Image (tube, helix red, strand yellow):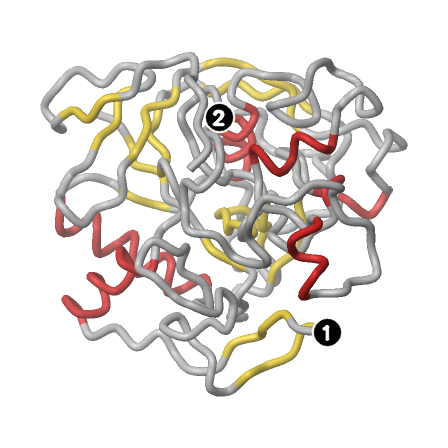
Amino acid sequence: MKSIIGFFALFTVTAASAQEPGDVIQDCADCPRMVVIPVGNFVMGTPIGAYEVNEESGEGPPIGISIRSAFAIGETEVTIGHFRAFIEATGYQAGDGCDVIRDGNFEDPEAGWRKPVQPRRVKDDHPVSCIDFAASVAYADWLSERTGEMYRLPSESEWEYAARAGTTAPRPWGANNSFEGVSLSLTCEHANAYDGESQKDYTFAWPYARCNDGYADVAPVASFAPSAYGLYDMMGNLWERVQDCYTTSYWGRPPDERAWVWGGGCERRVVRGGGWYSRPTNVRPARRASGNPDGRGNDLGFRLVRELK
């Protein structure tokens, strides 16, 4: 595993302990580890017309966001092992069939969260995929009931704030604030994207990072360097679900940590951060796309937020 030392010294604390930025909370033995994120302000999104961004991205206009309440977010994506504990305890039926990545995106009726096709050799520390939005919410609700704490999907603003880890560069590992100045060759140290290793097995019609990260497709969680906040795989590996309804711009969204949803429900939900097959220019905190809440794909996972009292 590649590693760096972040801004915070991370250590596990009990729920009753003081919850300071960088503390890691684990409410039960098979619960996800949650990292406490500080309050603060940041600019969400990317200027339209900027390098790597098009008008369909929905990343603009940039908006100032105030994160008013500290929260804890998953140190990693929820894993197959985490999700299995939920299934075994509740008997929840996550459904069969899953859209898988091959030469294109197509449904495999035999694929599922136990057998997602990618990765080829499934381990409990791989991120769980092939589940729909409802299943991720059901898992969060189960953790909440089990622990007495509030678990939920992050809002889009919480997710990007945590992913940026206090930086303003297009990528947290960038050397400066310009898109052109960021070395994409650093991608292989920090995120699982479409790279030289992937290109050996999967020939997609877009550029790949000119480096090798050792994984042709989905990697076990925490296989790459953590961010300054001590979080793994916020970008790359799997796209991640958030609460918000998908919109084509940020006009009118709440300028704080609240999710942007409406009473009639969301026809589409936001997914974030890019995946293992994404072109490296799309593996960054501001990257967003539209996801079908009812869809099950092996390119899509999630991590949770734990609210702090």
The residue located at (70%, 65%) in the rendering is 202
Image side of residue 253 versus residue 37, left or right: right
Which amino acid type is shown beneath numbered disc 2? Ser
The tag on residue 276 is none
> Which one is in front, 2 or 296?
2
- Secondary element under disc 2, as helix, strand or loop, is loop
> Residue 70: x percent and y percent?
36, 21
Counting residues from the N terminus, which is met first, the one under dot 1 or under dot 2? 1
Residue at 75 percent of width and 29 percent of height: 46
Q: Secondary structure at mark 1?
A: loop
Q: Is residue 264 above or below residue 247?
A: below
Vertical placement of 232 versus 96: above or below?
Answer: above
Residue furthest right as drawn: 49
What is the x, y in percent for residue 239? 56, 51
Q: Position of residue 147 (x, y in %)?
A: 13, 44
Label 2, on which residue? 227
Look at the picture and state if 155 lies above or below 44: below
Q: Residue at x 80, y 20 (%)?
A: 181
**For the view shown, which residue lies furthest in the bottom direction?**
109
- The residue beneath circle 1 is 103
- The quadrant in which the C terminus is found is top left
Q: Depth check: give the residue in front, 264 or 20.
A: 20
Query: Residue 73 lies in what quarter of the image?
Result: top left
- Nearest the viewer among 106 and 157 is 106
